[in-house]
Amino acid sequence: MDEQQGKATSQLSFLDYVVDHIEFTNNPAYDADAVDITFDFRHEVAYAQPDAYVTLHLDIFPDAKVNNYPFSFSLSVTGHFQINAKSPEEATAFLNVNAVAILFPYLRALVTTYTANANIQPLILPPMNIANMLEKASKKEDTGTD
């Protein structure tokens, strides 16, 4: 490996992911033309050097019948990573932002594919600024606000 390649090598390697849970419930009573996307996103990190696992949870349109949403969708995926960090704090920082950002597009693709295959209007989640989204979620947790 030449010197340039060594400098470009990331401390974080994405190995694989698995779908842990997926649940879709259609709401045939849905009666509206359009609806704003409502979802809850959270993540968990498990780290034992060099292996790390990051699980993303996404709940879209919770309580579809009560809230007149077209469907309810709940899913979680777990990514397997390897990390070469100098400290546990550095590993946690990488995993909480970078690993989540790496794994999130797989979650988005699952939502689009699943809704398209359910023979409804496919839901395409917009690209997200993961660092900003996690920062906002952290502030909500710290202040206890919604």
Image (cartoon, helix red, strand yellow):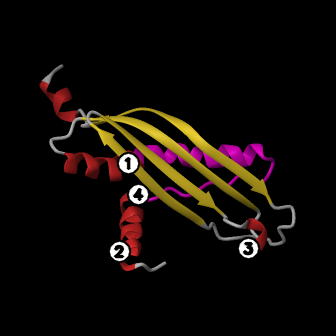
Residue drawn at x 45%, y 39% is: 79
Gap between marks 3 and 2 measured at Cα: 28 Å
Residue under label 3, please give it.
67
- Part of the protein shown in magenta: 101-129
Measuring 18% from the left and 19% from the top, which residue is drawn there? 1
Label 4 environment density (alpha carbons within 10 Å; few <14, some 14–19, many ≥20): some
Q: Could you tell me how far apart the alpha carbons at marks 1 and 4 are, in whole angstroms? A: 15 Å
Question: Gap in Å between the C-alphas at discs 4 and 2?
Answer: 18 Å
Q: Is residue 14 left or right of residue 110?
A: left
Going from the N terminus, do you reach mark 3 or mark 2 first?
3
Secondary element at tag 2: helix
What's the distance in space between the residues labelled 4 and 3, CA to CA? Answer: 27 Å
Q: CA distance from mark 1 to mark 3?
A: 31 Å
Q: Can you identify the residue that label 2 sits on?
A: 142
> Mark 1 against mark 4, which lies toward the viewer?
1
Frontmost residue, 138 versus 126: 138
At numbered mark 4, what does the secondary structure look like: helix, strand or loop? Answer: helix
Decide which of tag 4 and tag 3 comes sooner along the chain: 3
> Residue 16 in the image: x percent, y percent?
45, 31
The dot on residue 130 is: 4
- Looking at this view, is 33 or 54 the one in front? 54
Amino acid type, mark 2: Asp
Residue 45's tag is 1
Amino acid type, mark 1: Val
Q: Residue at x 15, y 21 (%)?
A: 2
Residues under numbered marks 3 and 2 in contact, where contact means CB atoms less than 8 Å apart: no
For numbered disc 1, what is the local secondary structure?
A: strand
Judge whether residue 114 is colored magenta. Answer: yes
